[in-house]
Amino acid sequence: METLMIIPDAGCRIADSRSEMRDMRYAIKEFVGILILFILLLFSSPGFSQDVSAIPVPDPSSPIADRASQIAQPELHPESGIRHPGNWVLVIHGGAGGPPQGSMPEEQEQAYKDKLNEALAIGTGILEKGGASMEAVEAVVMFMEDCPLFNAGKGAVYNNEGVAELDASIMDGSTLMAGAVTGVKTIRHPVSAARLVMTQTSHVLLMGEGAELFAKEQGLELMDPSYFQTPARTEQYERMRKYLEEKELQNNEINRDKSKVIIRDKKQEAPDTVKMVDDKTKGTVGAVALDNMGNLAAATSTGGLMMKMKGRIGDTPIIGAGTYANNATCAVSCTGTGEYFMRNVIAYDVSALMEYRGFSLEEAANYLIREKLKSQGGGGGLIAIDKEGNIAMPFNTNAMFRGYAKAREGAVVEIY
């Protein structure tokens, strides 16, 4: 018997494969046809046509088109993620303290306002052209360091030996980098030295002779210490020296009874601190800014307190105490009795209250200056901007020389 073997026909298999390929091509053609039909229906819908026709096409020769081409698309800072097209803000201060409202001669009051306006104009000129917040705050503080009305640079007060010892700091909110100098006697613009410490060294703070040597190596302008002495500050120094001599004589009489000394110290320590800020100096200058890229910056400069001990360092060159900037929260510059600002880390605490407690900028600033600081007897104030462009300028003294400017708004200066 013969065995019959059935071998599959290869031709059948090829035919089946070709049939499957044809079916697949037909399916693809049908899908593409449906997709094209859907797109045509979408573009021809009334809603779509109305949306497109509603967009105005400006005449290239018109002023509006020219303005639009200048603005273009706002730049986006890679870290902040916030767009600020033309929403820059600048706030400045010329120090907290001074006589009560109505007691300053009108011409002197106007002189302060004029210089504050000039300082705002310098910063505004940088920011409205798209300049960086760091450039703006440095330029503003440099101007104020050259103005003898303010307690910084040329107008700095003297220590107990009759010498101006200068402090300054600056901080970039986009990088959290900072620089500062303290106890310098020959650098014309300490704020510029502070910025170079930030950009040209791995340090944050340089002091005294080392800072001056560094400034010289960097090509900054150095002055003889006598440059920082002005007739007004010299007269103030002599008046203060005489007052302290008389006070020392009175203390010698009180010292005969130690119990009186203890009572006097406890009762008068806090009020004297605030009074000292009002009566002895209008200390410190500072600036904070938000630029069109959403970057915050802060800078502060000062001569400290009149008749301070030689070598005394206040809050101004201490990052977090007198100066702080962080794109995530705010930029802050402080003014007042530095010891209280250092103990409470005031500048950073504004940021911390916002970040960790959910305070608004105004709530944080007001609480620290008008409640916490004042309850301890600390006199002073601060200026601040948050990442949205909101500002705060609280103070607990008679006055604080201050001003602000915003994009598309005029400048405002205030004293009381």
Image (spheres, rainbow, N blue to C red):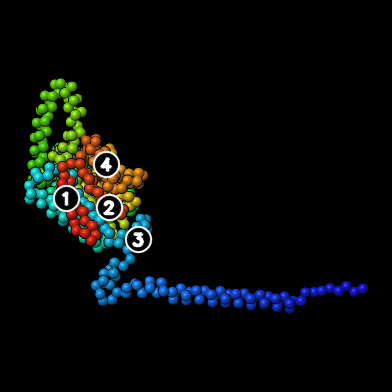
Element class at badge 2 = loop
The residue identified by callout 4 is 368
> For the residues marked 2 and 4, what is the alpha-carbon distance in whole angstroms?
17 Å
Rendering coords of residue 361 (x, y %): 29, 48
The residue identified by callout 2 is 390
Element class at badge 1 = strand
Mark 4 or mark 1: which comes first in sequence? 4
Residue type marked 1: Glu
Work out which quarter of the rendered image holds the N terminus and state it. Answer: bottom right
Q: Nearer the viewer, residue 338 or 17?
A: 17
Residue type marked 4: Leu
Mark 2 or mark 4: which comes first in sequence? 4
The residue identified by callout 1 is 414
> For the residues marked 2 and 1, what is the alpha-carbon distance in whole angstroms?
17 Å
- The quadrant holding residue 366 is top left
Element class at badge 3 = loop
Mark 2 or mark 1: which comes first in sequence? 2
In this view, the mark in front (3 or 1): 1
- The quadrant holding residue 405 is bottom left
The residue identified by callout 3 is 76
Residue type marked 3: Leu
In this view, the mark in front (3 or 4): 4
> For the residues marked 4 and 1, what is the alpha-carbon distance in whole angstroms?
21 Å
Rendering coords of residue 154 (x, y %): 14, 49
- Mark on residue 267? none
Seen as rendered, the residue at the extreme front is 46
Residue 266 visible to the viewer:
yes
**Does residue 293 lie above or below 215 as drawn?**
below
Q: Are marks 2 and 1 in contact (CB under 8 Å)?
A: no
Q: Are marks 3 and 4 in contact (CB under 8 Å)?
A: no
